[in-house]
Protein backbone atom coordinates (compact mmCIF):
# COMPACT_ATOMS: atom_id res chain seq x y z
CA UNK A 1 0.00 0.00 0.00
CA UNK A 2 0.88 3.70 -0.06
CA UNK A 3 3.92 4.43 2.13
CA UNK A 4 2.74 7.20 4.46
CA UNK A 5 5.37 9.89 4.71
CA UNK A 6 5.00 11.56 8.09
CA UNK A 7 4.57 15.30 7.98
CA UNK A 8 6.36 15.96 11.27
CA UNK A 9 7.34 13.38 13.83
CA UNK A 10 4.98 10.38 13.83
CA UNK A 11 1.26 9.81 13.48
CA UNK A 12 -1.40 10.59 10.91
CA UNK A 13 -3.49 8.10 8.99
CA UNK A 14 -5.30 8.00 5.67
CA UNK A 15 -8.85 9.27 5.95
CA UNK A 16 -11.62 9.54 3.38
CA UNK A 17 -13.51 12.78 3.91
CA UNK A 18 -15.15 15.76 2.21
CA UNK A 19 -13.05 18.68 1.05
CA UNK A 20 -15.09 21.88 0.67
CA UNK A 21 -14.75 23.97 -2.45
CA UNK A 22 -16.93 26.28 -4.48
CA UNK A 23 -17.91 29.91 -3.89
CA UNK A 24 -19.91 31.98 -1.43
CA UNK A 25 -23.37 30.44 -0.94
CA UNK A 26 -22.39 27.69 -3.39
CA UNK A 27 -20.64 24.81 -1.62
CA UNK A 28 -19.23 21.81 -3.44
CA UNK A 29 -17.60 18.78 -1.84
CA UNK A 30 -14.90 16.53 -3.19
CA UNK A 31 -14.64 13.08 -1.65
CA UNK A 32 -10.96 12.76 -1.04
CA UNK A 33 -8.45 10.35 0.47
CA UNK A 34 -5.95 12.44 2.42
CA UNK A 35 -3.66 12.28 5.44
CA UNK A 36 -5.70 13.13 8.51
CA UNK A 37 -3.30 15.86 9.55
CA UNK A 38 -3.60 17.82 6.33
CA UNK A 39 -5.86 20.84 6.03
CA UNK A 40 -9.41 20.08 4.99
CA UNK A 41 -8.93 21.60 1.53
CA UNK A 42 -5.21 20.91 1.35
CA UNK A 43 -3.11 18.43 -0.55
CA UNK A 44 -4.74 15.01 -0.83
CA UNK A 45 -3.63 11.58 -1.97
CA UNK A 46 -6.45 10.93 -4.41
CA UNK A 47 -9.89 12.22 -5.26
CA UNK A 48 -12.49 9.47 -4.97
CA UNK A 49 -15.60 11.36 -5.95
CA UNK A 50 -17.66 14.48 -5.55
CA UNK A 51 -20.90 15.64 -3.99
CA UNK A 52 -23.14 18.57 -4.85
CA UNK A 53 -25.09 19.41 -1.68
CA UNK A 54 -27.55 21.74 -3.42
CA UNK A 55 -30.45 20.05 -5.23
CA UNK A 56 -30.54 20.44 -8.99
CA UNK A 57 -33.43 21.40 -11.26
CA UNK A 58 -35.08 17.99 -10.71
CA UNK A 59 -34.69 18.18 -6.95
CA UNK A 60 -31.84 15.65 -6.81
CA UNK A 61 -28.56 15.90 -4.93
CA UNK A 62 -25.95 14.42 -7.23
CA UNK A 63 -22.85 12.56 -6.05
CA UNK A 64 -20.17 10.65 -7.93
CA UNK A 65 -18.07 7.82 -6.45
CA UNK A 66 -15.08 5.85 -7.68
CA UNK A 67 -15.91 2.53 -6.02
CA UNK A 68 -12.89 0.69 -7.37
CA UNK A 69 -10.43 3.09 -5.76
CA UNK A 70 -12.59 3.29 -2.64
CA UNK A 71 -12.17 -0.43 -2.21
CA UNK A 72 -8.45 -0.05 -2.66
CA UNK A 73 -8.12 2.64 -0.01
CA UNK A 74 -10.39 0.84 2.43
CA UNK A 75 -8.30 -2.26 1.90
CA UNK A 76 -5.20 -0.18 2.67
CA UNK A 77 -6.78 0.73 6.00
CA UNK A 78 -8.26 4.17 5.40
CA UNK A 79 -10.68 5.59 7.96
CA UNK A 80 -13.93 7.33 7.04
CA UNK A 81 -15.38 10.58 8.31
CA UNK A 82 -18.96 10.46 9.57
CA UNK A 83 -20.51 12.34 6.63
CA UNK A 84 -18.58 10.09 4.25
CA UNK A 85 -19.92 7.02 6.07
CA UNK A 86 -23.46 8.36 5.83
CA UNK A 87 -23.13 9.13 2.15
CA UNK A 88 -21.72 5.69 1.36
CA UNK A 89 -24.47 4.12 3.44
CA UNK A 90 -27.13 5.95 1.45
CA UNK A 91 -25.35 5.01 -1.77
CA UNK A 92 -25.48 1.33 -0.81
CA UNK A 93 -21.75 0.68 -0.85
CA UNK A 94 -21.66 0.35 2.94
CA UNK A 95 -24.53 -0.60 5.26
CA UNK A 96 -26.87 2.22 6.26
CA UNK A 97 -25.46 4.34 9.09
CA UNK A 98 -27.31 3.92 12.45
CA UNK A 99 -27.78 7.65 12.88
CA UNK A 100 -29.43 7.97 9.47
CA UNK A 101 -32.09 5.51 10.60
CA UNK A 102 -32.36 7.10 14.06
CA UNK A 103 -32.65 10.58 12.57
CA UNK A 104 -35.40 9.44 10.23
CA UNK A 105 -37.29 7.81 13.12
CA UNK A 106 -37.02 10.94 15.26
CA UNK A 107 -38.26 13.12 12.41
CA UNK A 108 -41.19 10.84 11.80
CA UNK A 109 -42.10 10.84 15.48
CA UNK A 110 -41.88 14.64 15.64
CA UNK A 111 -44.10 15.00 12.58
CA UNK A 112 -46.64 12.59 14.05
CA UNK A 113 -46.68 14.52 17.31
CA UNK A 114 -47.18 17.79 15.46
CA UNK A 115 -50.00 16.28 13.43
CA UNK A 116 -51.68 15.04 16.60
CA UNK A 117 -51.35 18.41 18.32
CA UNK A 118 -52.80 20.04 15.22
CA UNK A 119 -55.65 17.55 15.08
CA UNK A 120 -56.44 17.83 18.81
CA UNK A 121 -56.94 21.65 18.89
CA UNK A 122 -58.83 21.44 15.58
CA UNK A 123 -61.12 18.75 17.06
CA UNK A 124 -61.46 20.74 20.28
CA UNK A 125 -62.44 23.92 18.45
CA UNK A 126 -64.81 22.00 16.15
CA UNK A 127 -66.43 20.28 19.16
CA UNK A 128 -66.87 23.52 21.06
CA UNK A 129 -68.36 25.10 17.94
CA UNK A 130 -70.86 22.25 17.46
CA UNK A 131 -71.69 22.20 21.20
CA UNK A 132 -72.43 25.92 21.27
CA UNK A 133 -74.47 25.54 18.06
CA UNK A 134 -76.56 22.67 19.45
CA UNK A 135 -76.90 24.47 22.79
CA UNK A 136 -78.23 27.58 21.22
CA UNK A 137 -80.43 25.49 18.91
CA UNK A 138 -82.02 23.49 21.72
CA UNK A 139 -82.26 26.55 23.99
CA UNK A 140 -85.25 28.83 24.06
CA UNK B 1 -9.77 85.79 29.55
CA UNK B 2 -7.60 82.92 28.33
CA UNK B 3 -8.57 80.48 31.16
CA UNK B 4 -12.23 81.38 30.66
CA UNK B 5 -11.83 80.78 26.92
CA UNK B 6 -10.24 77.39 27.57
CA UNK B 7 -12.98 76.56 30.07
CA UNK B 8 -15.57 77.45 27.44
CA UNK B 9 -13.78 75.23 24.92
CA UNK B 10 -13.76 72.35 27.46
CA UNK B 11 -17.48 72.79 28.09
CA UNK B 12 -18.19 72.78 24.36
CA UNK B 13 -16.09 69.60 23.95
CA UNK B 14 -17.93 67.85 26.78
CA UNK B 15 -21.29 68.82 25.33
CA UNK B 16 -20.31 67.46 21.92
CA UNK B 17 -19.24 64.19 23.53
CA UNK B 18 -22.49 63.93 25.50
CA UNK B 19 -24.77 64.79 22.58
CA UNK B 20 -24.51 61.45 20.77
CA UNK B 21 -25.49 59.55 23.94
CA UNK B 22 -28.74 61.50 24.03
CA UNK B 23 -29.97 59.27 21.22
CA UNK B 24 -29.98 56.27 23.67
CA UNK B 25 -28.02 53.83 21.49
CA UNK B 26 -25.39 51.26 22.25
CA UNK B 27 -22.75 49.93 19.87
CA UNK B 28 -23.75 46.28 20.49
CA UNK B 29 -27.28 46.98 19.30
CA UNK B 30 -26.11 48.63 16.11
CA UNK B 31 -26.28 52.34 15.32
CA UNK B 32 -29.59 53.94 14.25
CA UNK B 33 -30.77 53.97 11.49
CA UNK B 34 -30.34 50.42 10.21
CA UNK B 35 -28.93 48.83 13.39
CA UNK B 36 -30.34 45.93 15.40
CA UNK B 37 -32.81 48.23 17.17
CA UNK B 38 -34.28 49.47 13.92
CA UNK B 39 -38.03 49.00 14.33
CA UNK B 40 -37.59 45.25 14.42
CA UNK B 41 -40.19 43.48 16.54
CA UNK B 42 -39.49 39.99 17.93
CA UNK B 43 -42.45 38.57 15.95
CA UNK B 44 -41.17 39.12 12.43
CA UNK B 45 -37.66 37.80 13.16
CA UNK B 46 -37.39 34.76 15.46
CA UNK B 47 -34.47 34.59 17.89
CA UNK B 48 -33.05 31.41 16.37
CA UNK B 49 -33.21 32.69 12.82
CA UNK B 50 -30.27 34.09 10.90
CA UNK B 51 -29.27 37.61 11.95
CA UNK B 52 -28.25 40.36 9.61
CA UNK B 53 -25.55 41.33 12.13
CA UNK B 54 -23.71 38.55 14.05
CA UNK B 55 -24.58 38.12 17.76
CA UNK B 56 -20.95 37.84 18.91
CA UNK B 57 -20.23 40.08 21.86
CA UNK B 58 -17.27 42.22 22.74
CA UNK B 59 -15.52 39.49 24.78
CA UNK B 60 -12.92 37.05 23.57
CA UNK B 61 -12.86 33.39 24.53
CA UNK B 62 -10.06 34.03 27.04
CA UNK B 63 -12.14 36.37 29.23
CA UNK B 64 -13.55 34.87 32.46
CA UNK B 65 -17.28 34.15 32.61
CA UNK B 66 -19.62 36.94 33.78
CA UNK B 67 -20.89 37.34 37.35
CA UNK B 68 -24.42 36.48 36.26
CA UNK B 69 -23.14 33.03 35.21
CA UNK B 70 -21.45 32.26 38.55
CA UNK B 71 -24.02 29.68 39.71
CA UNK B 72 -24.64 28.24 36.25
CA UNK B 73 -24.46 24.47 36.01
CA UNK B 74 -24.17 23.12 32.50
CA UNK B 75 -26.16 19.90 32.14
CA UNK B 76 -25.58 17.41 29.33
CA UNK B 77 -28.36 16.99 26.77
CA UNK B 78 -31.14 14.56 27.77
CA UNK B 79 -30.79 10.99 26.51
CA UNK B 80 -33.63 8.50 26.04
CA UNK B 81 -32.30 5.17 27.46
CA UNK B 82 -34.45 2.99 25.15
CA UNK B 83 -33.29 4.87 22.10
CA UNK B 84 -29.73 4.69 23.38
CA UNK B 85 -29.89 0.91 23.68
CA UNK B 86 -31.34 0.60 20.21
CA UNK B 87 -28.71 2.92 18.77
CA UNK B 88 -25.87 1.07 20.51
CA UNK B 89 -27.08 -2.24 19.12
CA UNK B 90 -27.29 -0.72 15.64
CA UNK B 91 -23.79 0.66 15.96
CA UNK B 92 -22.47 -2.72 17.08
CA UNK B 93 -23.91 -4.45 14.05
CA UNK B 94 -22.78 -1.66 11.76
CA UNK B 95 -19.19 -1.91 13.01
CA UNK B 96 -19.28 -5.68 12.64
CA UNK B 97 -20.29 -5.40 9.00
CA UNK B 98 -17.79 -2.62 8.39
CA UNK B 99 -14.86 -4.61 9.79
CA UNK B 100 -15.87 -7.61 7.69
CA UNK B 101 -15.96 -5.44 4.56
CA UNK B 102 -12.56 -3.98 5.41
CA UNK B 103 -11.14 -7.48 5.79
CA UNK B 104 -12.51 -8.44 2.40
CA UNK B 105 -11.11 -5.36 0.71
CA UNK B 106 -7.76 -5.98 2.37
CA UNK B 107 -7.70 -9.51 1.03
CA UNK B 108 -8.50 -8.19 -2.44
CA UNK B 109 -5.69 -5.65 -2.29
CA UNK B 110 -3.18 -8.23 -1.09
CA UNK B 111 -4.24 -10.66 -3.78
CA UNK B 112 -3.79 -8.04 -6.44
CA UNK B 113 -0.37 -7.09 -5.10
CA UNK B 114 0.71 -10.72 -5.05
CA UNK B 115 -0.44 -11.24 -8.60
CA UNK B 116 1.35 -8.14 -9.76
CA UNK B 117 4.51 -9.24 -8.03
CA UNK B 118 4.33 -12.64 -9.62
CA UNK B 119 3.68 -11.15 -13.03
CA UNK B 120 6.59 -8.74 -12.52
CA UNK B 121 8.88 -11.64 -11.63
CA UNK B 122 7.77 -13.27 -14.87
CA UNK B 123 6.47 -16.59 -13.52
CA UNK B 124 3.05 -17.29 -14.98
CA UNK B 125 3.38 -20.95 -14.04
CA UNK B 126 3.53 -19.98 -10.39
CA UNK B 127 0.39 -17.94 -10.85
CA UNK B 128 -1.32 -20.89 -12.46
CA UNK B 129 -0.12 -23.16 -9.68
CA UNK B 130 -1.36 -20.71 -7.09
CA UNK B 131 -4.75 -20.47 -8.72
CA UNK B 132 -5.02 -24.24 -9.00
CA UNK B 133 -4.10 -24.68 -5.39
CA UNK B 134 -6.60 -22.03 -4.36
CA UNK B 135 -9.32 -23.81 -6.32
CA UNK B 136 -8.39 -27.11 -4.70
CA UNK B 137 -8.48 -25.41 -1.31
CA UNK B 138 -11.95 -24.11 -2.04
CA UNK B 139 -13.06 -27.60 -2.98
CA UNK B 140 -11.63 -29.04 0.21
CA UNK B 141 -13.31 -26.34 2.20
CA UNK B 142 -16.59 -27.15 0.54
CA UNK B 143 -16.26 -30.83 1.32
CA UNK B 144 -15.30 -30.18 4.92
CA UNK B 145 -18.22 -27.86 5.24
CA UNK B 146 -20.59 -30.52 3.93
CA UNK B 147 -19.21 -33.05 6.40
CA UNK B 148 -19.37 -30.61 9.23
CA UNK B 149 -22.95 -29.72 8.45
CA UNK B 150 -23.84 -33.39 8.29
CA UNK B 151 -22.21 -33.99 11.65
CA UNK B 152 -23.94 -30.99 13.18
CA UNK B 153 -27.28 -32.13 11.85
CA UNK B 154 -26.79 -35.59 13.30
CA UNK B 155 -25.75 -34.15 16.63
CA UNK B 156 -28.80 -31.92 16.64
CA UNK B 157 -31.07 -34.83 15.98
CA UNK B 158 -29.35 -36.81 18.71
CA UNK B 159 -29.82 -33.99 21.13
CA UNK B 160 -33.45 -33.60 20.23
CA UNK B 161 -34.03 -37.30 20.69
CA UNK B 162 -32.31 -37.28 24.06
CA UNK B 163 -34.30 -34.27 25.15
CA UNK B 164 -37.55 -35.89 24.13
CA UNK B 165 -36.58 -39.06 25.99
CA UNK B 166 -35.77 -37.11 29.10
CA UNK B 167 -39.03 -35.25 28.81
CA UNK B 168 -40.92 -38.51 28.49
CA UNK B 169 -39.15 -39.96 31.49
CA UNK B 170 -39.97 -36.89 33.48
CA UNK B 171 -43.59 -37.12 32.45
CA UNK B 172 -43.76 -40.76 33.43
CA UNK B 173 -42.13 -40.05 36.76
CA UNK B 174 -44.61 -37.31 37.40
CA UNK B 175 -47.46 -39.62 36.53
CA UNK B 176 -46.16 -42.36 38.81
CA UNK B 177 -45.68 -39.85 41.57
CA UNK B 178 -49.19 -38.55 41.11
CA UNK B 179 -50.59 -42.06 41.14
CA UNK B 180 -48.78 -42.89 44.36
CA UNK B 181 -50.04 -39.77 45.98
CA UNK B 182 -53.55 -40.52 44.83
CA UNK B 183 -53.34 -43.99 46.28
CA UNK B 184 -52.10 -42.65 49.56
CA UNK B 185 -54.89 -40.13 49.65
CA UNK B 186 -57.51 -42.81 48.99
CA UNK B 187 -55.99 -45.03 51.63
CA UNK B 188 -56.09 -42.20 54.10
CA UNK B 189 -59.69 -41.52 53.21
CA UNK B 190 -60.51 -45.12 53.84
CA UNK B 191 -58.72 -45.18 57.15
CA UNK B 192 -60.44 -41.96 58.07
CA UNK B 193 -63.64 -43.91 58.34
CA UNK B 194 -62.12 -45.82 61.27
CA UNK B 195 -60.75 -42.79 63.04
CA UNK B 196 -61.84 -41.87 66.48
CA UNK B 197 -63.44 -38.42 66.38
CA UNK B 198 -64.84 -36.49 69.34
CA UNK B 199 -68.33 -37.64 68.29
CA UNK B 200 -67.31 -41.31 68.12
CA UNK B 201 -65.26 -41.17 71.25
CA UNK B 202 -67.90 -42.26 73.73
CA UNK B 203 -69.30 -44.92 71.41
CA UNK B 204 -65.87 -46.36 70.75
CA UNK B 205 -64.99 -46.39 74.42
CA UNK B 206 -68.21 -48.24 75.16
CA UNK B 207 -67.40 -50.67 72.33
CA UNK B 208 -63.90 -51.36 73.68
CA UNK B 209 -65.17 -51.82 77.16
CA UNK B 210 -67.88 -54.18 75.92
CA UNK B 211 -65.43 -56.37 73.94
CA UNK B 212 -62.37 -57.09 76.01
CA UNK B 213 -59.54 -58.59 73.97
CA UNK B 214 -56.87 -60.76 75.37
CA UNK B 215 -53.38 -59.97 74.03
CA UNK B 216 -51.62 -62.59 76.10
CA UNK B 217 -50.46 -65.33 73.76
CA UNK B 218 -47.32 -67.35 73.27
CA UNK B 219 -45.25 -67.96 70.14
CA UNK B 220 -43.42 -71.16 69.27
CA UNK B 221 -40.16 -71.35 67.35
CA UNK B 222 -41.86 -71.20 63.95
CA UNK B 223 -43.60 -67.97 64.82
CA UNK B 224 -47.08 -69.41 65.09
CA UNK B 225 -49.37 -68.17 67.78
CA UNK B 226 -50.07 -70.68 70.51
CA UNK B 227 -53.37 -70.08 72.29
CA UNK B 228 -53.47 -73.38 74.07
CA UNK B 229 -50.61 -74.50 76.25
CA UNK B 230 -49.86 -77.91 77.73
CA UNK B 231 -50.85 -76.83 81.21
CA UNK B 232 -54.42 -75.66 80.26
Image (spheres, rainbow, N blue to C red):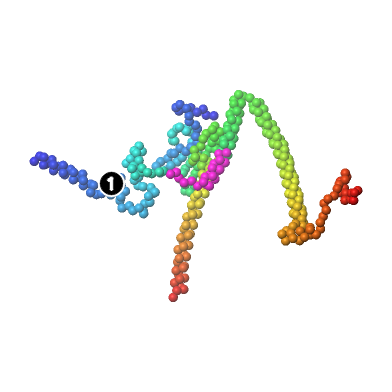
Residue beneath label 1, please? B26
Give the quadrant of the N terminus of chain A: top right
Give the quadrant of the C terminus of chain A: bottom left
Q: Is residue A65 left or right of residue B41?
A: right
- A14 and A52: which is toward the camera: A14
Q: Is residue B10 left or right of residue B171?
A: left
Residue B178 drawn at (x, y percent): 74, 51
Q: Please tell me whether mark 1 sits on a helix, a strand or a loop.
A: loop
**Local crowd at mark 1 within 10 Å, few (<14), some, or many (≥20)?**
few
Q: Is residue B91 magenta?
A: yes
Q: Please say if B83 is above or below A123.
A: above
**Is residue B146 shown to the viewer in this render?**
no
Residue B122 drawn at (x, y percent): 62, 24
**Is residue B111 shown to the viewer in this render?**
yes
| Identity of the residue drawn at 28% across and 46% down | B26
Q: Is residue A33 left or right of residue B2?
A: right
| Identity of the residue drawn at 52% across and 29% down | A2
Residue B23 drawn at (x, y percent): 24, 49
- B32 and A69: which is toward the camera: B32
The magenta segment is B75-96
Amino acid sequence: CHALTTLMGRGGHVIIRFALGGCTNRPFFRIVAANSRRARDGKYLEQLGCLDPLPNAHGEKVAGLNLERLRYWLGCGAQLSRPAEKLLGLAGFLPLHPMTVTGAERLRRRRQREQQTEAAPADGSAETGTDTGTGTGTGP
Amino acid sequence: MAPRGSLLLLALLLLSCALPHARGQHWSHGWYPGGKRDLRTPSDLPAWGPRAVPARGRKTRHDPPAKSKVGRVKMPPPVDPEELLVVQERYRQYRLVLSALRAEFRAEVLQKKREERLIAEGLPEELEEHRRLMAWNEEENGRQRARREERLRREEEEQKRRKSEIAEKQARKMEAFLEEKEKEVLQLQEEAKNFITPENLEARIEECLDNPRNYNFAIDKDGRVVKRTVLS
